[in-house]
Amino acid sequence: MPDSSVPLHGNRALVGRTEVVRLLGTEAERAAAGEFRLVELTGDPGAGKTRLLGETAAAALRHGLTVLRGRGTEYENDVPLSLAVDALDDEVESRAEQVRAALDPESARLLADVFPALSADRPLPGPAAAPSTGLNRYRVHRAVRLLLEALAGPGGLAVLLDDVHWADEGSVELLSHLARHPPRGPLLLAVTYRTRQAGPRLTAALADAAPGLRTRIEVAPLTLREAGEFLGPSVGARRRRALYEASGGNPLYLEALARSAPAAAAPAGSPVESAAPAADDDLLPSAVREALAAELAALPDDARLAAQAAATLGDEFEPGMVAVAAPTTEAEALAALDELAVRDVVRCAPTPGRFRFRHPVVRHLAYASSGAGWRVAAHARVAAALDERDAPTVTRARHIARSARFGDLLSVGVLVEAARATAYQSPATAAQWLRTALDLLPEKPGGTATGPAPDRLSLLVELARLQGVGGRLVQGRDTALEVLRLLPPDAWAQRARAARFCAILERLLNRQAEGRALLRSELGRVPPEHAADAVPLHLQLIGDSLIRADFPAAAEQLDRLTAVLSRPGGGAEAAGGAPDDWVPLVVLRLGCAYGAGDLDAAHGLAAKAERLTEEATDAALAPWLESLSFLCWIDAMMGRLPQAARVVERSLAIANATGQSYLSPWILTAQAFTYGRTGRLAEAVDRAEDAVDAARLLGSDECVALALAVKSLMVRWTGDHAAALALADEAIRHADGRREWWALLGAVGRGLALVGLQEVDAGAAQVLDACDAFVAPLLERSCLLVCCEAMADAEAERGRSAAAADWAKRAAAVPGGGTGSGHAVLARAHAEQEDDPAAAARGAVRAAELFEGTGERLSAARAWLRAGTAHARCGQKSAARAELARAAEVFGACGALGLHARTVREQRRLGVRAGRAARTPADGRLSRREAEVAELVRQGFSNQRIAERLFLSPRTVETHVAHVFAKLGVSSRAAVAGKLAEVREPGSGGSGASGASGAQ
């Protein structure tokens, strides 16, 4: 909510915080100057964090920033993204037209589900508009980031969030996203939280911020002298010391003890109780707790009842609902609130007509002071009143969860509805609602007048999926095991599906052996006459063998599955009439053939899989989506790039529509890999970033490691080898020593990045180790060939022909690494550069033809580069210039600036006046990062300042600037500003650089 003045904190002067206030003023000044700043104020309850947040607001207002405030609450952390809604919704409503104009349609649609102010004009969703689970919620986080940028410019914005230790899961994930992907423009994000109540997810989220972006302030206790100033001259020295020792210098505790009778303070010389936490989650010293309890106990009966009733309602409350919860009349409730306000138990809230407690600790104690039975009845009364008012389901569910009786099926229905309403934005919150509903559901419910009771097993399956995509993989696995325990022993088909899902979660938890053991155990229980029901178990075991590169085991399991499907009644009808035409079986056979090096069979199976998937409906493919994700990768690895792109798009759509978004990180990473091979580097890096974000939300180290490794390989192409090295190192940390192909990809990225940094020997050793010295490599063949070609090039460039020839020989020994492999042919050309440049030129030209045939633009350009240098060695300058010109054009258009610079150097040796990267037509399709860079160029930032601002290396910024020039069809920084001004014209539908990216 907007804030135009410092909020109420009482009239007491601020004591002992001069240096902190100065630092907060500096942070506000830096934000006003155009930086994004993240400030944390942390300490014990009552340390003065909220008061200092008010000082932050005052400093922000002095520097011209718009101040918006939000607050987490103890008992209402079940509304997804509640901190963002609390802070931003009023401002969004007041600037709705401006916000809509600044957002692309997809972001506006996503935000309409979050902010009530944007939901009024939202069209009704179609049948497939709302995915049932929310791993793709990183898109919502990015939309909120764009919203913050729109609200911040140009005058600046300060978003102040109090008590974020009570934040809902969705808000914590949003904070993590903003810390890792800081918004552009003048924006200050300040948060407060209790140090000892901040969960590991919150602290990890804030720690994700880039160095130099985050300022953490520990709000320390007052000194004895400051405590005396705080208490004032009316408190004598002896009592002042007693109060100080009992409170530990905490301002709230000092105030509470000072309000109480002098006896409430601990005598001088007694132990300082604040050093030891109390038993409950508020960590209050017992003397302070007793003093605050005494303050509440001293209230008149009607005022105390009103305080207890108000504590059930929320952070802010209205008198009418206090009357409902008490229960009493509204007039009596108003009178009681007057008494509470006089005694400073409650204060007027910023929202007119509402009140709030003077401190969350007071609310906590008021709630705890009421009887447990009374609280149940109060929540029931509030739930009934909200139902009569047609309040949102989630608001009602909060009170129903605290008051519903076991077996109350109407309440179960509300909780299930609340879970489904919040599933996309916050699966973890939705899972809590479902778990509560299950706790209320009898084993054999009889149904209600409005319909049958929910099915327990169906709800448990739904719960397991929510826990999985919510990043609670262990809980999801345990729930799936609970489903297995509850299923009848002879429910073979249901048990197979449940066991398969358990195995998927075990893999995501890096517990592959446990997943295999479960699958084999279930498979061993299935009688022969029900073998068809066990097909999901066979498929999962085959997929596991392929990922581990155990191709003999995969082939054996495939034969076994084929035999099962071929029996009369063995499931051939599920395969469309013949096992050989069943998509999952064909895809897994393809994976086995490709992995085993039988490329002729692989090409035939790939064509068959393409035909069958195109003929199949989404509904037919959805149950076997994991098999389809294999096809995404295999097509890309085999160089079937157009086919891979199509399968990826379809797989993502099916995953989102059917609640299988836990597979999205794998599929998104395959998309990044595919884009990179076709030279769409900016999009490849963006998709890899999407995959990393999704994998982090999922909580799977395997998915994070794979996505980071692919991102490292894509960034390497841009020439930013330092950034590629950092990404590869992080991928290796997440892989944690595993020896599977996805884990080794990070080591490949690290080796190639070291080569790019001219540490060729170290890079070669790393690559050779990742490839298991080519003895029994776990990496797939296309990756092995890429490694051989890159290393042969590196060795040739430093004049080591023999070493280059060794790498070329390794490439030739890889299955399919003969004359039909562009990488193998090019590796040989590198090796021949020194001794037989004519052969090198012919080989490089042939390699370029092979790469062009598969659409691998960057690899083709590398071949043209080698052909150019080889022609030059032969004295064929005209041919050399032509090949180098082709290479330079592709490198420039794709943003491979390191390779472009290398090509330009070769051109200049031949007397060619070569300049910056070649430009592509001005279609204006900027990626998100390019749009950020373009906007900063427009504002007059140098490349160095842009690098500091966006936490990128200067070389990466150079790459992005080159992309911006090429895509906008300009050749100067001033022209970029002109192009963006055109985009900002009325009717363009965009704002600044964000409008330029709207076409994507």
Image (tube, grey):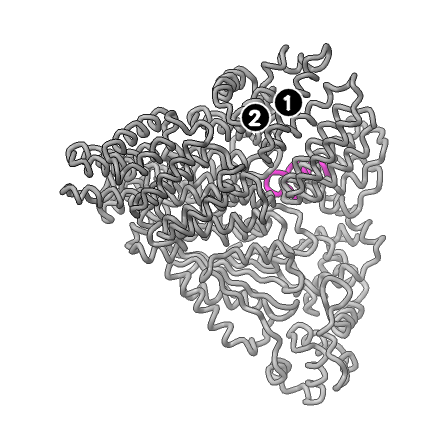
Please, what secondary structure does the residue beneath circle 2 have? helix
* Residue 967 lies in the magenta-colored region: no
Q: Earlier in the sequence, mark 2 or mark 1?
A: 1
* Rendered-image quadrant of the C terminus: top left
Residue type (three-letter) at the residue carrying disc 1: Leu
Residue nearest the viewer, comparing 305 with 394: 394
At horizontal 41% and vertical 34% (from top left) the residue drawn is: 811
Left or right side of 340 for 692:
left
Is 861 left, or right, of 356 in this rendering?
left
Position above or below: 225 against 565: below
Residue at mark 2: 592
Task: Report the disc number at residue 949.
Answer: none
The correct choice, above or below, for 407 with respect to 274 in the image is above
In the foreground, 458 or 61: 458
The segment highlighted magenta reads 415-429
Q: Secondary structure at mark 1?
A: helix
- Residue 669, position in %: x, y? 50, 37
Instruction: Determine contact: label 2, label 1, CB under 8 Å.
Output: yes
User: How many residues crowd around disc 2 within 10 Å: few (fewer than 14), some, or many (20 or more)?
Assistant: many
Number of numbered discs overlaid on the protein picture:
2
Horizontal and vertical percent for residue 838?
A: 23, 32
Amino acid at dot 2: Cys
Q: Quadrant of residue 617?
A: top right
Residue drawn where x is 62% and y is 61% of the image: 348
Taking the image as shown, residue 944 lies to the left or right of residue 397, namely left
**Prevailing SS of the magenta stretch:** helix
The answer to whether any part of residue 967 appears in the image is: no
Q: Pointer 1: what residue?
A: 558
Determine the residue positioned at 64% across, 59% down.
Answer: 198
Question: How many angstroms separate mark 2 from mark 1 (CA)?
Answer: 9 Å
Asked whether 531 or 113 is in front, the reply is 531
